[in-house]
Image: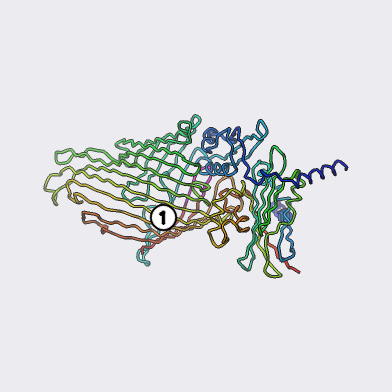
Amino acid sequence: MAALIRVAAVALVLLPAIAAAEPRPTFIAQAGRVVAAALPAAVLAEKDVERQLRSGLTATFVLVARQRDSDAKGAARIEIRFDLWDEVWIVRRIEFDGREDRQRIATRELLEKWWSAPLRLFAAAADRVALNVTLTVLPFSAAEGEDARQWISKSGGVAQTEGGSPLVAALIGTTLSAKPIRSYRWQTELVFR
Amino acid sequence: MKRTFLTAIAAILIAGTLRADDAAPARFLVERIEVRNTKRVSSTLVVSETLLREGHEYSEEDLRAASLRLSRMPFILSSDFALEKGSDRGRYVLAITVQEAKPFFYLLDIRPTLWDDSRRSARIDSDIDVDPTTESKDAGFGFRWFVGGRGVVHVGYVSHADRQSFTRDFSGAAIGYTQYGLFGTAAFATINLRLPLGSSQTNLISPQLVVGVPITKTQTLSFDVENTRFSRSTFHISDQDFERSESEQLISLAWTYNTTNQPFVPTSGTVLRVSAVRSNQDRTSFTFTTIGFDAPPVPLASHLNGTGIDLVGNHYWELSERNSVSAGVLTGWGTVRERNNPPTFRPASFGYRPTYEILHAGFSRNLWRTESKNGDSRIEADLLYVLRQFDVEHGSFVSANPYPYNQSAVEGVISWARRSSWGMLRLGVGYAWQR
């Protein structure tokens, strides 16, 4: 019985530490009521994510932000592939408005710096916004999923123009048939001044 | 310090550059394919089923399709793909790490339906109704052994059921062999010897041959020939011997387009299937031509020819890593000719057209918060609308079922699906009411 109490006490002490260990991005209120997320490098260090990053194949990260009290949502996507022969990271990011950035990055340190740069994912309509944000890590590149792109374009009013919506481009990773490697959920509330 | 600074400067310079070919989808020249973590499954078989070949160049889309193909194999639970440096620049080794299923397998789908005919007095169907949207042809349990590079021997208990009303559904023991990679292609063939339940006293071995030919990474043609003997015996009555037998010859040809992520509990992708089936059934027995049994029995022979087409279209949407929804249409038509001699209880010639339409929508949720390599555990909720029609072309007879008929029912099913390295178990209950 005493042992059980000791275990429970240790668990109580460790629980907050375990909860705190879950990687959490920093959400930033930018000009023009834009919400950006600075992703923690700890995500890249997660065992399953690290294995995919080292596989020589693409790891796709899809960030979706949904406003809690409305249907508004925004999305952004990051793709990272380590070129085994050139030993560089080939990276791509697409923000909520379709702004795209592609780079070749030479070191892991610079990759983490690039990864942690604010990623714009949502445009708010008011000065205060509460968001549920999910990050899903998928194996393989989302760039070639033309079937999925067409399907999203036709469904649910998510996009009206054929293949032209930034949200479609960002969301496309979520319709890939591959099972997610890892996923995270966060909540945030921001005030724009 | 100076060295670190120079390295950082060099790295920043490289970071700013982007090759033109980085914008194009990457392609990888795979010089070798290695399969890892296999204990029972042959590596040759796994490679064969990916449809990837050494010495060819592939995109990530090709590798993703190969990964999905492996995920649909009943004896592989999951697979991880990774590239390694090959013998020369630009060449790669593709490493596939698999999680195998156990040699014992089961596929059990137990979902009894509570039928509410009157909306007041419900009854439980005495039979176990399998969801009409599932393909339960291979339901059963048994053992499998991998032999040679591309062969699998299996022994077990299987059931045969389809949605066409004129074909025979049965269960029985089976022993079989599947050869993958036929003639150096991705085709496979299975030979089964089956003993239908109830025919064991007559030792009627019924052969079956299934040939599958993948025509693309997502499309397969399959051909099935079955000769099933359900009974054969001699019955002695009134100093006469009568042969009593029942048999069915069944041929079917199916085209399947499948992009789902796994065979039993898919959460994303599409299945389209078009199949044509031909069934010839023969029955011999004896009958009495007059009521009261005062006349001697006479031999009875019945023959049935049925031809049908089945169409299946299901799509699965992954809403999140835990939730998915599905919707689909299943429909089929048949033309059946039945001949009876003498026409004692059934007409000499009877022709009818059975049809069915099933619309369904479903939701499923993963009970596990994190992705597991060891299968799935999901709660499923399905709503089905089932319409069955039976049009008489010619002939009529007195039957408990009025002909022609037009029956429709709505059914809700809640179930728990568990796929593990041991097999697939689906437990649930349905509630149906006729309209």
* Figure colour scheme: rainbow
Who is closer to the viewer here, B205 or A109? A109
Residue that mark 1 sits on: B112
Residue located at (37% from left, 48% from top): B162
Please, what secondary structure does the residue beneath circle 1 have?
loop
Question: Relative to residue B373, is residue B126 depicted above or below?
Answer: below
Q: Which of the 4 image quadrants contains residue B96?
A: top right
- The segment highlighted magenta reads B418-426
Residue B413 lies within the magenta run:
no
| Rendered location of residue B59, percent (x, y) | 59, 42
Where, quadrant-wise, is the N terminus of chain B in this rendering? top right
Residue A24 can be seen, yes or no? yes
Q: A14 and B40: which one is in front?
A: B40
Seen as rendered, the residue at the extreme left is B294
Q: Quadrant of the C terminus of chain B?
A: bottom left
Q: Is residue A15 visible?
A: no
Q: Nearer the viewer, residue A109 or B56?
A: B56
Pick out the residue farthest to the top: B148
List x then y, in percent, for residue B124.
Answer: 38, 58
Residue B313 left/right relative to B267: left
Figure check: B405 above or below B146: below
Q: Amino acid at mark 1?
A: Pro
Q: Position of residue A57 (x, y in %)?
A: 64, 43
Magenta span dominant secondary structure:
strand
Q: Residue furthest right?
A: B2
Q: Residues within 10 Å of mark 1 (few under 14, many from 20)?
A: many
Q: Nearer the viewer, residue B66 or B106?
A: B66
Q: Which image quadrant is residue B92 in? A: top right
Q: Percent from the top left, x then y, of residue A6?
A: 72, 53
Provide the chain ID for the residue under circle 1: B
